[in-house]
Image (cartoon, helix red, strand yellow):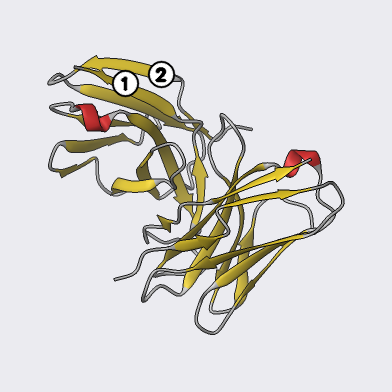
Amino acid sequence: ETGVTQSPTHLIKTRGQQVTLRCSSQSGHNTVSWYQQALGQGPQFIFQYYREEENGRGNFPPRFSGLQFPNYSSELNVNALELDDSALYLCASSLGGSYGGSTDTQYFGPGTRLTVL
Amino acid sequence: DQQVKQNSPSLSVQEGRISILNCDYTNSMFDYFLWYKKYPAEGPTFLISISSIKDKNEDGRFTVFLNKSAKHLSLHIVPSQPGDSAVYFCAASAIEKLTFGTGTRLTIIP
């Protein structure tokens, strides 16, 4: 069974640029969630995708957008990068996705470290 | 508004003794609670979870206790081992969105 993978591992961008981060979910999982972890903080929920549809969003501006593909892999896109976007971006996959409460465990990938200069 | 709080940024425990990590939450809608362990340069690794309908869940050396009336949960690790040294995050789930605490760095002293 393949775990959650993310690419790239590290990325350096400049302010105003755009970035795309990628995630492959664990085998059999149809739900992908994205989190941003700033230094010294816990991960913050960005959004979740279930069967290619956005299934919940945290307190992030619209320049953070996502996509899920038919094979349940996912992308996180960030436009007009700002210095504060520098963080570890984590992807997690799970079995569930039904909106309305769930006890499905989310399994995390290793993350992509984004540095914005 | 910090809905999940881990008030101890760090904890040091002697090898072989019990480690107790604590977490408090404010949102009554949380129905599932998890503990994750994180090593540097890695993603969080799932450790153990508990549903809001239970008050205890045990898995090997790890036990999670939930006190709903106090909105408090704790993770007990016994006996503590050097490999347990890591940052531990408490997370709470409502509608599948996980809300994390800020983490507790656990150091096991040989």
Q: Is B49 situated left or right of A93 in this image?
A: left
Residue A24 is marked as none
The image quarter containing residue B6 is: top left
Q: Is B80 situated left or right of A72 in this image?
A: left
Please name the amino acid that badge 2 sits on: Ser
Residue A98 in view here = no
Find out whether the residues at labels 2 and 1 contact each other: C-beta distance under 8 Å: yes
The residue under the point 59% across, 65% down is A22
**Mark 1 element type:** strand
The image quarter containing residue A20 is: bottom right
Same subunit, labels 2 and 1: the answer reads yes
How many other residues sit within 10 Å of disc 1, few (<14), some (14-19) or many (≥20)? many
From the image, tell me which residue sits under label 1: B107
Residue B28 in view here = yes
How many labels, in total?
2
- From the image, which quarter does the N terminus of chain B lie in? top right
Q: Is residue B80 above or below residue A34?
A: above
Q: Depth check: B69 or B100 in front?
A: B100
Please name the amino acid that badge 1 sits on: Thr
Q: Depth check: A82 or A57 in front?
A: A82
- From the image, which quarter does the C terminus of chain B lie in? top left
From the image, tell me which residue sits under label 2: B10
Residue B11 in picture, x, y percent from top left: 35, 17
Q: Chain of mark 1?
A: B
Q: Is A59 situated left or right of B95 in this image?
A: right
Q: Is B92 situated left or right of A62 in this image?
A: left
**Mark 2 element type:** strand
Residue B103 in picture, x, y percent from top left: 45, 30
Q: Depth check: A93 or B20 in front?
A: A93
In this view, the residue farthest toward the bottom is A70
The residue under the point 24% across, 32% down is B83
2 or 1: tag closer to the N-terminus: 2
